[in-house]
Amino acid sequence: MSQPKIRKIRVGVASCGIAAGADEVLDLLRSRAESVPVEGTGCLGHCYAEPMVEVVLVDGNSVFYRDVKADEGHIENILALGDKDRFEIPSARKSKELIKVLALAGRVDPTRFEDYTENGGYEGLKRALSMTPAEVVNEMKLSGLRGRGGGGFPTGNKWSFLAAKDTAEKILICNADEGDPGAFMDRSLMESVPHQVLEGMLIAAYATGATKLFIYCRAEYPMAIKHMGIAIGQAREHKLNVINERELEIIIKEGAGAFVCGEETALIASLEGQRGTPRFRPPFPTDRGWKGWPSMINNVETFGNVPLILREGAAAFAAIGTEGSKGTKLFALAGDLKNPGLVEVPMGTTLREIVFDIGGADPDKVKAVQTGGPSGGCIPVELFDTPVDYDSLKKLGAIMGSGGMIVIGKDRCMVETARYFLDFTHRESCGKCTFCRVGTTRMFETLERIVAGKGEMADLDFLENIGPKIRMGSLCGLGQTAPNPVLATLRYYRHEYEAHVKDHNCEALQCNPLVDLYLDKSNCIKCKLCIKTCPVNAISDDFVIDNDKCTRCNACKDVCPKKTIYRVKKGSKR
Amino acid sequence: MSPKYAFLEKIGKEPSNLIKGLQAVQGAEGFVSDESIVAIAGYFGIPEVEVEGVLSFYAQFKRVKPGKYKIAICDGTACHIKGSSQVAEWLTRELGIKSGETDERGHFSLETVACLGCCSLAPVMSVNGRVYGKLDRKSIVKILKEYENK
């Protein structure tokens, strides 16, 4: 039975919602809700509570439900506005967050044009069109917006470079190749509010006189591609892509899985159908880009900010944030914390506020946070009072990056974390620059040796020595930043490296070659679950683990009902 | 050109669409075969070696036929921290194949990918694009069983 009190029901069906089963919830709600409209919407940013359902009441208030399952019980409970599984947005998120760019995410149906226009959509474009292009560029400069892809280059300046060109074709590219492992801000924006990204691009096209618009999106984001495609079709229907009486071509190009293509010149090579290798700059893309035409590349989130600036004015935007970093920033919070998800905070918010207050991480269990993905560095918990802006993070040896923020718990090994990032970068190195190609591989091999307990003290010096050389000898951002995770962990956690080398000890008990599995018989109830579970028969009938056979897969540890199997330092309990 | 690849005609002939062409072929056949490389090179009017050069650069393109169900283990940062290497190990145990391999029946294939963008549900994997989150050994066994019988 549907309730007359309910105006409509929204189900978050962005990728992470669907991963948690939201599509089935949506279908079932649709079949049960009778006269109440049930719509699929984007991401509210509370990924830990997915699948999430919002019931909008006739009086305008909303009731949220979390962890909804596609079964009769859950659905009945929601339709009856029951108390079970109700979800309150945590107060810390309400007070610390400032939702500007994400204002419509999870509030509108991303595939409906009217949902966007009824909520202020395309007002920014309208205002831009009432100004001269030069005035729009100036507005962008006044706003102080800096590139959200990680580089932090002032957006208004970039626009002015392209605007100054007088060529038959000018190319505008939206960089949606969000390849940073651990980042999903751009995916969320494109899935949840595709029109906002598109509006930003159209405003930029007007301001710079661009003639051809590309969206270079990674193929791993099918829903983002779909929603952007729908938005482009709707914009065409409403003639929004006709600027200065010229119909602009808007093309979505799918990337093909190469991290380096996030770099401007590599991205352009890929757009031209070539191997995505970067080239020497200058000439910069705004001088010579796609097929030789002046080209400007902005990130998805950068474009997502543009409609706000035009709608509310540069002054309102510049009032938010710090001296050198204006506006808000999206962060994809993940890792060892209670409330992972997508958050939006004013620039200058401290890491402490983001990780502990908003993310709900346990202060006793956090060791560090990694910003900027494989290009960034870790920041130890002792420095969590650092305000998050472009310049403060750089000082610490980390970078803002595009906004991936991974919380690293005390039970994680920093050497292994560094090894992981170098594993990624050495594989993703395009191979063009020797220092990057060979250097990252040598760094990776050295780290592999250290985590296996076969490192030497000279290895640490080698890492510190080669890192800066890779930085200097590489053409693009990939190589220039690849040593960061190693250098940052060496700077703050050198003792962990030394323990691996000197004592063959992994404090965090994470590096398998330095760890044994140990069954404490005093607490054992002899249920034999571990023996049955062990894939390599390494546990004897009298409950002793043969560590020569054991592969450290932890299957026994996970299955043990008494939690009496531990990871211990190799050779310590024999 | 063999009629098998007639669908390429929908894509503009300029070589900047090469990646799009490769994606279309892989979308249709699941991988890029030697035969399709000849067809693509002919269509865009570029040497076969250039096609091979571009496709070998991008991780997305496969040169061997994948299984009916393609399992992608996410090894993004969040998933790695939350134990993706263990997920890989469990899958390898259950399926008897390593990352990059296809089982003998052609039913399952396994690969490791950089990031599926569902970090808050880590560790995750996807089967033919459908993402499964918060994995543990039990849920993996259950998911595999589901696809085993499909």
Image (cartoon, rainbow, N blue to C red):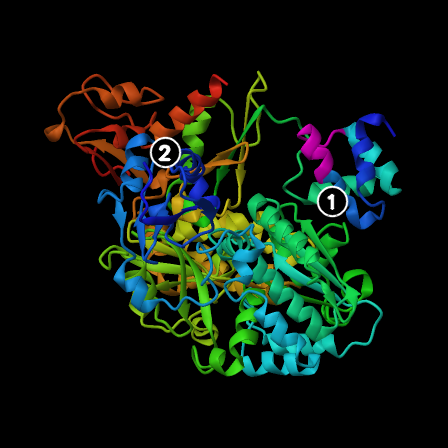
Q: Quadrant of residue A278?
A: bottom right
Task: State the image coordinates of residue B93 (x, y, percent, origin top left).
Answer: 43, 24
Q: What residue is drawn where x is 39% and y is 74%?
A: A348
Q: Is residue A136 magenta?
A: no
Q: How many marks?
A: 2
Image position of B53 with respect to A346: above or below: above
Location of the N terminus of chain B by quadrant is top right
Is any part of residue A454 visible from this angle? no
Chain to which the residue tagged by mark 2 belongs: A
Q: On residue A389, which mark appears?
A: none
Q: Which residues are magenta?
A: B23-33
Please give left or right for residue A154 compared with residue A44 in the image.
right
The residue under label 1 is: B19
Q: Is residue A79 visible?
A: yes
Q: Is residue A56 above or below residue B102?
A: below
Query: Please, what is the three-letter code of the amino acid marked with disc 1?
Result: Ile
User: In the rendered image, which residue does mark 2 sit on?
Assistant: A70
Q: What secondary structure is the magenta-colored segment mainly?
A: helix
Neighbor class of circle 1 (other Cα within 10 Å; few <14, some 14-19, many 20+) is: many
Say yes or no: labels 2 and 1 on the same chain. no
**In the displayed structure, does residue A378 sit left or right of residue A309?**
left
